[in-house]
Image (spheres, grey):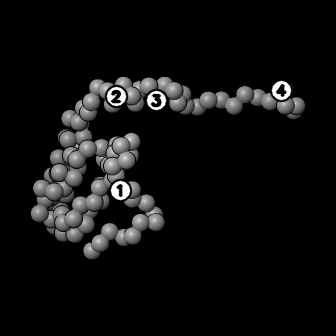
Amino acid sequence: MSADHRPEIPQIFDRALLRRRHQRAVALGAATFLLNHVADDMADRLAAVLRRFDRAADLGSPGTAVRAALGRLVSVGTIVGADLSDWKTGNYEMIHEYMKPIPR
């Protein structure tokens, strides 16, 4: 095929629309009722486990609901979190494959 007759590459994601929706959601503020419910339910289920977790990682949960729920459990020690919503402010410690292991 010549350059003039190449098929158009379909646009799978409307990035401008996604950006507008994200900006609108940020402007409306957090609606955390569902995440709070999930965090509390997770903590209830984890409380039934007869094991100690010296270290726990919360990777990507917005806000502090999961970390707060885990923090209420006596069976959970140190909690490390990476809140992806903090990336836009630059206030984060990124967890990735090159990072040193979580201290014991």
Q: From mark 4 to mark 1, how far is it between C-alphas?
A: 48 Å
For the C terminus, give its image quadrant: bottom left
Query: Where does label 3 land, which residue?
Result: 19
User: Mark 1 falls on what kind of element?
Assistant: loop
Check contact, mark 3 vs mark 1: CB within 8 A.
Answer: no
Residue occupied by mark 1: 93
**Residue 77 drawn above or below residue 90:** below
* Label 4 sits on residue: 5
Disc 3 versus disc 2: distance between alpha carbons? 10 Å
Horizontal side of 88 relative to 31 (left or right) equals right
Residue 85 vertical placement versus 76 (above, below)? above
Asked if residue 74 lies left or right of residue 31, the reply is left
Disc 4 secondary structure class: helix
Q: Position of residue 45 (x, y in %)?
A: 18, 54
What is the spatial separation of the Cα atoms under label 3 and label 4, in whole angstroms? 32 Å
Q: Amino acid at mark 2?
A: Ala
Residue 85: x, y in percent?
A: 34, 43
Picture quadrant where residue 96 is located: bottom left
Per the model, the C-alpha gap separating discs 3 and 1 is 24 Å
Answer whether labels 4 and 1 touch (C-beta < 8 Å). no
The answer to whether marks 3 and 2 mark residues whose Cβ atoms lie closer than 8 Å is: no
For residue 36, side relative to residue 6 (left or right): left
Q: Secondary structure at mark 2?
A: helix
Can the viewer see residue 99 in this picture?
Answer: yes
State the residue at coordinates (46%, 66%): 98
| Residue type, label 4 | His
Quarter of the image where one finds residue 36: top left
Per the rendering, the mark at residue 25 is: 2
Task: Name the spot of residue 4 as percent of width and height, x first.
Answer: 84, 26
